[in-house]
Amino acid sequence: MKLPLVQFENATIIQNKQTILSDVNIEVQQGDFTFLIGKTGTGKSSLIKTLYADLPLQSGTGRVSDFNLAEIKQREIPFLRRRLGVVFQDFKLLSDRSIFENLSFVLKSTGWKDKKEIKERIEEVLDSLGVEGISGKYAFELSGGEQQRVAIARALLNEPELIIADEPTGNLDPQTSLEIMEVFRGLHQKGMTIIMATHDYNMIVKFPGKILRCDAGKIYEVVQKNEA
């Protein structure tokens, strides 16, 4: 029996010495598409930061892949993050570098050295997301949807076990948001495990998945009703 890819037991999420979430008991299995919902300030981003060890887990137990978040050492954090791909609402692309330079920076910083292999990997991932031919451009030359596809490409470069997306459609218009969600659905259909924080309930209806709700300092799974 496979262990969950993400598992928290009796965990407490703390930020700035304040308890954000308590009694966190959740599991995400390999291949799950999990939505993380809740109002602003209810702990979604704090939980996500805990997943990639930006916030230390100070109470309870938590695991991502085979990393123990309660005991992880500083030197181990880069190895955890290589197993993950993180997509942010504001893209976080470096404005003074081309798209190719943005992506090659990630590969070089995670141990890639061969220039030909770096170029081939970047082209492969961009092509798979429908944004081929843009590697020489800069972020300001791209639409919001193109920038988010590049951000997804960056997350996919090292073939992660888990994609974590924090409000990935928050800065996009409704049509572009739908297109980006189709990208995530395609990744999920290929077997990718995805955790996505969102406030867009329309997307949850259109793209069914497991739902975890943050509310009043707790997190719990909710059952999605099928709609005609």
Image: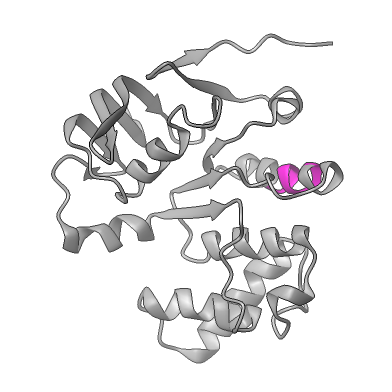
Relative image position of residue 68 (x, y in whole percent): 20, 42
Q: Is residue 226 left or right of residue 112?
A: right
Secondary structure mostly taken by the magenta-highlighted segment of the chain: helix
> For the point 75% across and 63% down, which residue is it?
146
- Per the rendered image, the range of residues in magenta is 178-183
Coloration mode? one colour
Relative image position of residue 142 (x, y in whole percent): 78, 71
Is 55 one of the magenta-colored residues? no
207 in relation to 190, above or below: above
> For the point 37% across and 73% down, which residue is it?
110
Relative image position of residue 163 (x, y in whole percent): 50, 48
Q: Is residue 145 left or right of residue 224?
A: right
Which residue is outermost to the bottom? 115
Q: Quadrant of residue 46?
A: top left
Q: Is residue 191 left or right of residue 144?
A: left
215 in relation to 62, above or below: above
